[in-house]
Amino acid sequence: MTPARISLPDLAAMERLGAVIAGALRAGDVVALSGGLGAGKTTLARAIIAALGHGGEVPSPSFAIIELYEPPAVRLPLVHADFYRLSDPAEADELGLDDYRHGAAMLAEWPEMAGGFGHEPACLGVTLEVADEGRIAIVEPGAGWLGRGPCR
Ligand SMILES: Nc1ncnc2c1ncn2[C@@H]1O[C@H](COP(=O)(O)OP(=O)(O)OP(=O)(O)O)[C@@H](O)[C@H]1O
Ligand SMILES: [Mg+2]
């Protein structure tokens, strides 16, 4: 299937896309947020987490690697991960990622550093690129995302 391109000219557009993804998100899903330094991965993750109900600050997980959000603060259990600092994908297993993911959805920044999640049918690939003052999102749904969220 051809990836969809979504124009994100400003932060309000990021918040709208975040809300659409959050509205469709289910346990077992992965939103794989790719793109270079400063592409907007954490910005989109924060928009999703806010739309799931979280009211406070959302720390970037770049230092801790994994941040957890639990109901009732959010609609469903959520793992927010930033794999940038992994030196080997096997370290994701050593962190206990599978246990954290059990019954949860995951937002994964730098997913390729954890070996990638594109083989999972419940993976929504979102690659952010700088475009003029804003961003473009290239959205590649796994089979489990067809017909929902931004893939309607
Ligand atoms: N659609 C957009 N339009 C304009 N500015 C944006 C947009 N999305 C994000 N930004 C801005 O881009 C900057 C970098 O965003 P962010 O920290 O989310 O990037 P990142 O991909 O997480 O980077 P890193 O890999 O370094 O963690 C922020 O200042 C943010 O406000
Ligand atoms: Mg980031």
Image (cartoon, rainbow, N blue to C red):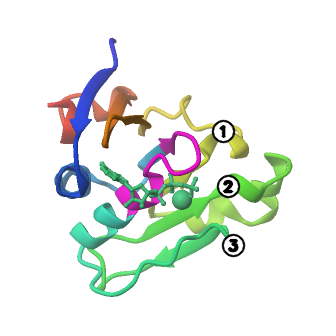
User: 11 or 98: which is nearer to us?
Assistant: 11
Mark 1, residues whose alpha carbon is within 10 Å: few (<14), some, or many (≥20)? some
**Image quadrant occupied by the C terminus:** top left
Q: On residue 83, which mark appears?
A: 2
Mark 2, residues whose alpha carbon is within 10 Å: few (<14), some, or many (≥20)? many
Q: Is residue 41 magenta?
A: yes
Residue 16: x and y, percent? 16, 53
The total number of labels drawn is: 3
What is the C-alpha distance between the residues marked 1 and 3?
Answer: 17 Å
Q: Secondary structure at mark 3?
A: loop
Q: Is residue 127 magenta?
A: no
Q: On residue 79, which mark appears?
A: none
Q: Secondary structure at mark 2?
A: helix
**Left or right: where does residue 30 sit relative to residue 84?**
left
Residue 43: x and y, percent? 39, 60
Residue 151: x and y, percent? 21, 31
User: 13 or 56: which is nearer to us?
Assistant: 13
Q: Amino acid at mark 1?
A: Glu
Which residue is labeled 1 in the image? 112
What is the C-alpha distance between the residues marked 2 and 1?
Answer: 8 Å
Give the mark nearer the N terminus: 2 vs 1: 2
The reply to whether the C-beta atoms of the residues labelled 2 and 1 are less than 8 Å apart is yes
Any part of residue 101 in sight: no
Residue bounds of the magenta highlight: 33-45
Q: Amino acid at mark 3?
A: Phe
Which residue is labeled 3 in the image? 63
Mark 3, residues whose alpha carbon is within 10 Å: few (<14), some, or many (≥20)? few
Quarter residue 136 falls in? top left
Q: Secondary structure at mark 1?
A: helix
